[in-house]
Amino acid sequence: MLSFKELILMYLQNIWNYFLDAIQPPKKEPVMKLIPIESSIIESIGYDEETNILAVIFLKNRSVYFYPGVPQEVYDNFVAAESKGSYLNEKIKGAYSYFKLEGVQLDPVVLDAAKE
């Protein structure tokens, strides 16, 4: 059983934690910066460094493929590759699992911000 002093300390700690939570700035949802790509098949790509997720948006049907577990080095090489489509086919497809979203309508502001 807790003593009166321990109960008071626990109560004060809870109040302090509540206060700290209340003054913290709101947490923002992660936003992946998209980079427009000069390619005949790819519109843009993005990468989240915290989760190592690569996003590839295709021109034809606006499908978005997410590739989790892609190392930063692979993304950097993808951005630097002369042929993005060839690099995707040779180094990413088949090497990493993916999930696909079709017909996604992306906010044009996000795409415009990536161009800056």
Image: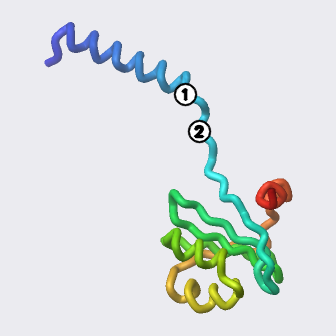
Image quarter in which the N terminus is found: top left
Q: Which residue is mark 2?
A: 27
67 over 27 or under it: above or below: below
Circle 1 SS class: loop
Near mark 2 (Cα within 10 A), the count class, few <14, some 14-19 or many ≥20, is few
Q: Name the residue rendered at 74%, 66% in the picture.
A: 35
- Residue nearer the viewer, 99 or 46: 46
Near mark 1 (Cα within 10 A), the count class, few <14, some 14-19 or many ≥20, is few
- Residue nearer the viewer, 8 or 91: 91
Residue 91 falls in which quadrant of the image? bottom right
The amino acid type, in three-letter code, at marker 2 is Lys
| Rendering coords of residue 14 (x, y %) | 37, 20
- How was the colour assigned to the protein in this rendering? rainbow
Q: Which mark is residue 72?
A: none
Classify residue 71 as left or right of residue 76: left
Q: Name the residue rendered at 52%, 73% in the picture.
A: 73
| Rendering coords of residue 115 (x, y %) | 81, 61
Residue 54 falls in which quadrant of the image? bottom right
Count the marks: how many? 2
Circle 2 SS class: loop
Q: Which residue is mark 1?
A: 24
Tag 1 near tag 2, CB within 8 Å: yes
The amino acid type, in three-letter code, at marker 1 is Gln
Image quarter in which the C terminus is found: bottom right
| Rendering coords of residue 57 (x, y %) | 73, 74
Residue 23 falls in which quadrant of the image? top right
53 over 41 or under it: above or below: above
Q: Name the residue rendered at 68%, 74% in the picture.
A: 56
Spatial separation of the CA atoms under disc 1 and disc 2: 8 Å
Q: Name the residue rendered at 83%, 83% in the picture.
A: 60
